[in-house]
Image (cartoon, coloured by chain):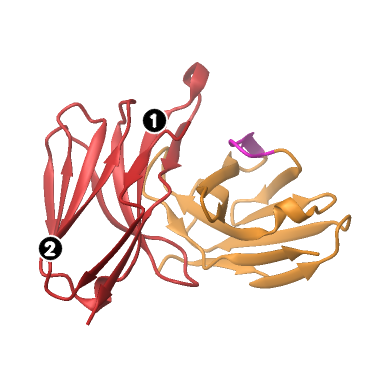
């Protein structure tokens, strides 16, 4: 069972369109992070959300953390070809038995923005 | 960019041979991680380290071992490589537990 479910898995849109991708779980996270990964590269952190209900904006990207800290969304306004990439969410929670916090990644949303 | 270097970047090896991947950081971060990334599975944690000589298993640790003898180096060893270990391997570092992770560029490993 995947701890973090991302949807959609694939998204292909035209330049200028808006889009939203989702990251859902039945578990509560202490924080949630969004990364973008380009082909042949490692993921790069975009934002971290910590407080339930928190909204963060990064230029045309808006990130929201659910009130219950179980889900998150990423909204992109007026998408551009440079937004193309794999978007990954990752939740931080303490491991079983009170062990160290671990990051668990969703499988990602592969976004293609066509010119 | 965070100072993380993975080596080698690409490797082809035969089934049954030992393989060691190296991750080197210049950031003095306490936590280091090894992930593998596969289509349909996303990023999965293999092992991680929370200090020199302190390591723990992740969700897919079978067939892998790690060592950290210095803060800056974290080694991942496949004792006897199998075709199921063909993957892209990423090293990551972070300052604290569950904190933002900074990733290396990855190592593409093919086991034939």
Residue A40 to residue B52: above or below:
below
Name which residue lies at 72% across and 51% down: B84
Name which residue lies at 40% across and 70% down: A38
Q: Is residue B92 left or right of residue B107?
A: left
Residue B52 to residue B27: above or below:
above
Name which residue lies at 67% across and 48% down: B68
Name which residue lies at 63% across and 37% down: B55
Mark-to-mark CA distance, 2 and 1:
31 Å
Q: Which region is colored magenta?
A: B54-61
| Residue B59 on the magenta segment | yes
| Residue B22 on the magenta segment | no
Q: Is residue B3 left or right of residue B61?
A: left
Residue A28: x and y in percent read 30, 26
Q: Chain of mark 1?
A: A
Mark 2 highlights which residue?
A18
Front one among B57 and B12: B12
At mark 1, the secondary structure is strand
Where, quadrant-wise, is the C terminus of chain A in this rendering? bottom left
In the image, which lettered chain appears red?
A
Q: Chain of mark 2?
A: A
* Count of numbered circles on the image: 2
Mark 1 highlights which residue?
A93
Residue A55 image-quadrant placement = top left
């Amino acid at each position: 069972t995947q701890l973090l479910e991302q949807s959609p898995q694939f998204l292909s849109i035209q330049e200028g369109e808006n889009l939203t991708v989702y990251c859902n779980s039945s578990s509560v996270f202490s924080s949630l992070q969004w990364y973008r990964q380009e082909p042949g590269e490692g993921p790069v952190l975009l934002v971290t959300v910590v407080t339930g209900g928190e909204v963060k904006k990064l230029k045309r990207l808006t990130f929201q953390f659910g009130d219950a800290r179980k889900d998150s969304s990423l909204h992109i306004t007026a998408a551009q070809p440079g937004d193309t990439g794999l978007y990954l969410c990752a939740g931080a929670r303490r491991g079983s038995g009170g062990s160290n916090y671990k990051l668990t990644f969703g499988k990602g949303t592969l976004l293609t923005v066509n010119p | 960019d965070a100072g993380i270097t993975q080596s080698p970047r690409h490797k082809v090896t035969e089934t049954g041979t030992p393989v060691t991947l190296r991750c080197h950081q210049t950031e003095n971060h306490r936590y280091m991680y090894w992930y593998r990334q596969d289509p349909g599975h996303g990023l999965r944690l293999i092992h991680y380290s929370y200090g020199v000589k302190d390591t723990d298993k992740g969700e897919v640790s079978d067939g892998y071992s790690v060592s950290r003898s210095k803060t800056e180096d974290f080694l991942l060893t496949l004792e006897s490589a199998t075709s199921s270990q063909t993957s892209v391997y990423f090293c990551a570092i972070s300052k604290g537990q569950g904190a933002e992770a900074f990733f290396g560029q990855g190592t593409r490993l093919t086991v034939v």
